[in-house]
Amino acid sequence: MKVSDRLGLYLQERGEMINRALEGFLPPPEAYPPVIHEAMRYSVFAGGKRLRPILHLATTDLFTDDPASSLFFACSLELVHTYSLIHDDLPSMDDDDFRRGRPTSHKVFGEAVAVLAGDALLTLAFEIIAREGRASAFPPDKVLAAAAELARAAGSAGMIGGQVADISSLPGSWDEVTLAYIHSHKTGALIRASVCSAAILHGASASQLERLASFASSLGLCFQIVDDILDITGDEARMGKRPGSDERNARATYPGLHGLTKSQELAKILYKKAVRELAPFGDRAGTLRALAAYLVDRES
């Protein structure tokens, strides 16, 4: 079986595993008050690659043959990511009408419920970690350390800090340092947490954790550069939203600063740097390598 076929099968199987678990973790849509639970489910089950939980599970593969051991944490990562997308789409942020080919949450449920749905997903993520982590076989200090990694990545030192820097930057005032900060925090921080949380839970050594953190940091920045490129070159049918959002909202992007060709070169450099960090893990890192290649070459 070709590497691409094996990865496709892996993505399908892990995606189904994650979706089944999310179905169990989310409140039923009829639970009172139903509108908030419908809104939460609407965005969680709107599709998507499940990249962050799959990166978490692929990192878990480095340390154990039991992918379900930290599935609860993988699902929490997806809930945090989904909350961020709901809020990003709001009129006060990116003002997007479509996400993954469907009307955005605030277009369906109104702004107030969309904000609250995002809040509820973020809160539920940490409820799941606390409840399931306590019942798991992981040492409590490892669960706490992994939770702290996710909280830091989602907060003002990570994703939120990157978003604030993004919306606060004046058009045309960006430089390489500012752009790298925005991308490494707004997008990269949660990707890093997806990888590092799995390593922490499974008792990675300091040197292993350092290498995986470096891998994830390079991959996160590479992912966002490719995202910037696709916002210019991407196909609306594949992407599920109209390209050109960055230009319409005067967002800081690598193509805007460096042009398309150099941005594509930078993405490839970061990809190679990321993959080099996986060398000590040998064949067990095959899925992480394949995921990195898939992300840099993706079309949506």
Image (cartoon, rainbow, N blue to C red):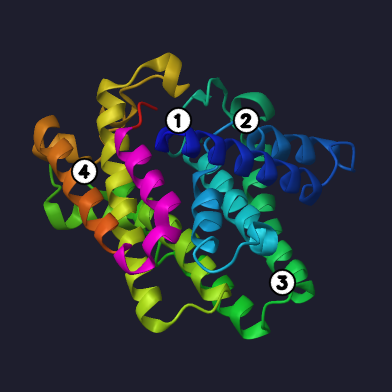
State yes or no: residue 290 in magenta: yes
Identify residue for label 3: 133
Taken as a whole, is the magenta stretch helix, strand or loop?
helix
Q: In this view of the protein, can residue 39 be seen by the observer?
A: yes
Query: Callout 4, which amino acid?
Result: Ala
Q: Earlier in the sequence, mark 3 or mark 2?
A: 2
Tell me, for residue 46, which label it has, or none.
2
Q: CA distance from mark 3 to mark 1?
A: 36 Å
- The residue drawn where x is 32% and y is 61% is 215
Circle nearer the viewer, 2 or 1:
2
Q: CA distance from mark 3 to mark 2?
A: 27 Å
- Where residue 3 sits in the image (x, y, percent)? 41, 38
Identify residue for label 4: 267
**The magenta stretch spans which residues?**
278-297
Query: Callout 1, which amino acid?
Result: Asp
- Secondary structure at badge 2 equals loop
Identify residue for label 1: 95
Q: Earlier in the sequence, mark 4 or mark 1?
A: 1
Circle nearer the viewer, 3 or 2:
3
Q: In this view of the protein, can residue 123 be seen by the observer?
A: no
Query: Callout 3, which amino acid?
Result: Gly
- Where residue 192 sits in the image (x, y, percent)? 41, 61
- The residue drawn where x is 69% and y is 38% is 113
State yes or no: residue 101 in magenta: no
Q: Report if the CB atoms under discs 3 and 1 are less than 8 Å apart.
A: no
**Residue 223 falls left or right of residue 125:** left
- The residue drawn where x is 76% and y is 40% is 36
